[in-house]
Amino acid sequence: MSDSNTTDFTNPSTFILLGIPGLEVSHIWLSIPFCAMYTIAILGNFTILFIVKRETSLHGPMYYFLCMLAVTDLVLSTSILPKTLSIFWFNSREIDFSACLTQMYFIHCFSAIESGIFVAMGLDRYVAICDPLRHSTILTNHVVAKIGLAVVLRSGMLALPYPFLARRWPYCTTNIIPQSYCEHIAVVKLACTDIRISSYYGLFVVFSVIGLDVVFIAVSYTQILRAIFNLPTKDARLKTFGTFGSHLFVILAFYIPALFSFLTHRFGHSVPLHFHVLMANMYLLVPPMLNPIIYGVRTKQIRDRLHQLFSHKDI
């Protein structure tokens, strides 16, 4: 293993993940907030799923989208955190080549699914606030199922070329990935061949998925904001704007680090590597932790069900 960075090979059996390069001595300390965020994400998202499944009154479009988001967050955080924590705690840096490509697929697929669900939730909020009388007729269960299927198919198909392209390149100089997980461009940069196809395809996905999703979200939230300012009372405006602001914060917490990470791989060569890797972890860890809090606990119906649940336990 000591000479893994100099051995010639075309198909490495394993890759070596460095964790947070430059902060190796702090891995144990970094594991504390990472583990805390993962624990909150697991407990929070499972709680959302349990409450929505248990309460038939919550079986509606908003809560179906919330459940889709919870499942996505669970998969997204679980796809990187166990391996990252094993690096921090046990210095277990090896990852099988096929496992690396599988992790790569899940990360990019479910990141795109998360983005698509944010668009769907923006649409749901737009209809609920701007056209509340037609909400139940526009967003029926059948329409929600179609939207969910479209989001999953779009993400799954667009992420599929990532591992196939990565597998076909020859790797002949090093198998050391300066990351805590197998991000697509970080892996293919190790190839000793022209990787422009992978690079261009990655940029195409970023701008066609995230770019378009951000535009759709911006349009829907602009309309929502206009509707908020047209509400008759100040209290109603403040209450609705508070919910709007918290939702917008979660969305920005996902898109800003994601775009920063994607673009830094290609253009941000002056950005310190440890800062880049930390930001690359944040967009996969912070939203799964915040989503059940912002979309769940701050939602009155779920908060009431939680209160009832714990009240019954106390009795």
Image (cartoon, grey):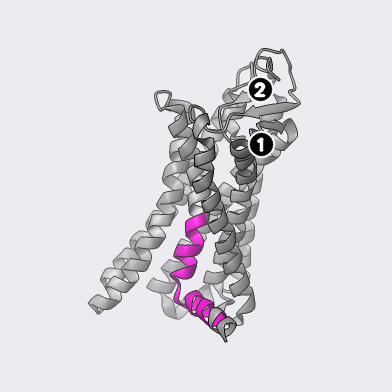
Q: State the quadrant of the N terminus.
A: top right
Residue 292 part of the magenta-drawn span: yes
Residue 161 — which label?
Answer: 1
Q: Nearer the viewer, residue 300 or 82?
A: 82
Q: Earlier in the sequence, mark 1 or mark 2?
A: 1
Instruction: Identify the image quadrant of residue 95.
Output: top right
Q: What whole-number distance in Å separates the C-alpha atoms at marks 1 and 2?
A: 21 Å
Q: Would you name the residue on which mark 2 appears?
A: 175
Q: How many residues crowd around disc 2 within 10 Å: few (fewer than 14), some, or many (20 or more)?
A: many
Q: Nearer the viewer, residue 160 or 294?
A: 294
> In the structure shown, which secondary structural element does the residue marked by tag 2 occupy?
loop
Name the residue at 55% across, 49% down. 35
Highlighted magenta segment, given as a residue range:
289-309
- The kind of secondary structure the magenta stretch mainly shows is helix
Q: How many residues crowd around disc 1 within 10 Å: few (fewer than 14), some, or many (20 or more)?
A: some
Query: Label 1 is placed on what type of residue?
Result: Pro
| Left or right: residue 260 compared with residue 40 | left
Query: Label 2 is placed on what type of residue?
Result: Asn
Name the residue at 36% across, 64% down. 244
Name the residue at 61% across, 21% down. 190
Instruction: Identify the image quadrant of residue 57.
Output: bottom right
Instruction: Identify the image quadrant of residue 168.
Output: top right
Vertical position of residue 175 compared to residue 127: above or below: above
